[in-house]
Amino acid sequence: MGQKVLPIKDSNVLTQVQRCLLEDFKTGRHNYTIFQVGKATLLRVSDILRLKRTDVFDDQGNVRQNMFLHDHKTGKANRLYLKPVTGDLLSYQNWLQQENLVSPWLFPSLQHPDKHITEKQFYKIIARVSALLNLDHIRRKTGAYHVYVQSNYNIGLVMHLLKHSSEAMTLAYLVLDQASTEEMLANIDFG
């Protein structure tokens, strides 16, 4: 039986993960940007890694406000808002130029720039971060959970972003444990 994947709910732990991705690897900007794009768009890793530069950047090298794609797993159309990661993407673009990495892929393999990084490669990076920080969960659920909390528990928004067909599916995906439920209830004025 596989391990239960949980979102990173603690903002301090999230900051540690981001710092580790950015600072503890030779290709930190690459790894960090994949994580940030995933967290902001709630895309599956498989969809993130298949992005092309032209999906994200216009002809002048500016980050597009929106990106359009079809979810690889479900085939559903997806319009993604990129403004939350514009700064990260521009920093990443500068890093690519400094590293002289030319590829049609947004996240090219560093050994084979004509191909994108594979899911297996990225999951090895995430496993290393997890080991370095003694964590057992770093996934797309983190972004979904933070959207849920910071949008004042707007389940409809999270459901829409994840392209789920029911609130029950989204609530199960968020893995709301007793501590999370109690924290939310503590902030409600019951009069």
Image: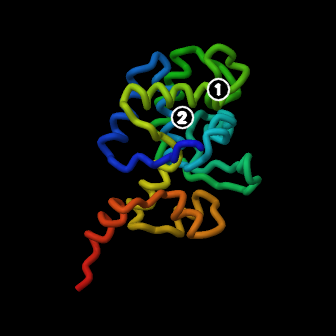
Where does the image place residue 37, in percent across and percent down from the top left? 53, 41
Residue position marked by numbered label 2 in the rendering:
34
- Say few, some or many: other residues with alpha carbon within 10 Å of mark 2 (under 14 / 14 to 19 / 20 or more): many
> The residue tagged with tag 2: helix, strand or loop?
helix
* Left or right placement of residue 115 versus residue 13 in this view: right
Amino acid type, callout 1: Ile
**The N terminus: image quadrant:** top right
The extreme left residue here reads: 191
Task: Identify which residue is drawn at 35% across, 60% down.
Answer: 180
Residue corresponding to mark 1: 117
> Where does the image place residue 139, in percent across and percent down from the top left?
51, 43
- Residue at 55%, 49% (x, y): give it: 41
Residue 113 to residue 49: above or below: above
Q: Are circles 2 and 1 on residues that touch, CB within 8 Å?
A: yes
x and y percent of residue 169 in the render?
59, 64
Residue furthest to the front: 1
How many neighbours does mark 1 have within 10 angstroms: few (below 14), some (14-19), or many (20 or more)?
many
**Viewed as shown, does residue 34 lie left or right of 15?**
right
Q: Please determine whether, in this image, residue 112 is positioned above or below residue 184.
A: above
In this figure, what is the number of numbered marks?
Answer: 2
Tell me what residue is drawn at x 60 percent, y 52 percent: 80
Q: Nearer the viewer, residue 65 or 72?
A: 72
The amino acid type, in three-letter code, at marker 2 is Ile
Seen at 60% across and 47% down, the residue is 43
Q: Quadrant of the C terminus?
A: bottom left
To which quarter of the image does residue 121 belong?
top right
**What distance separates the C-alpha of mark 2 from that of mark 1?**
10 Å
Which color scheme did the rendering employ for the protein? Answer: rainbow
> Which residue is outermost to the right?
75
| Image mark for residue 144 | none
Task: Give the vertical position of 180 relative to 41 (above or below).
Answer: below
Q: Secondary structure at mark 1?
A: loop
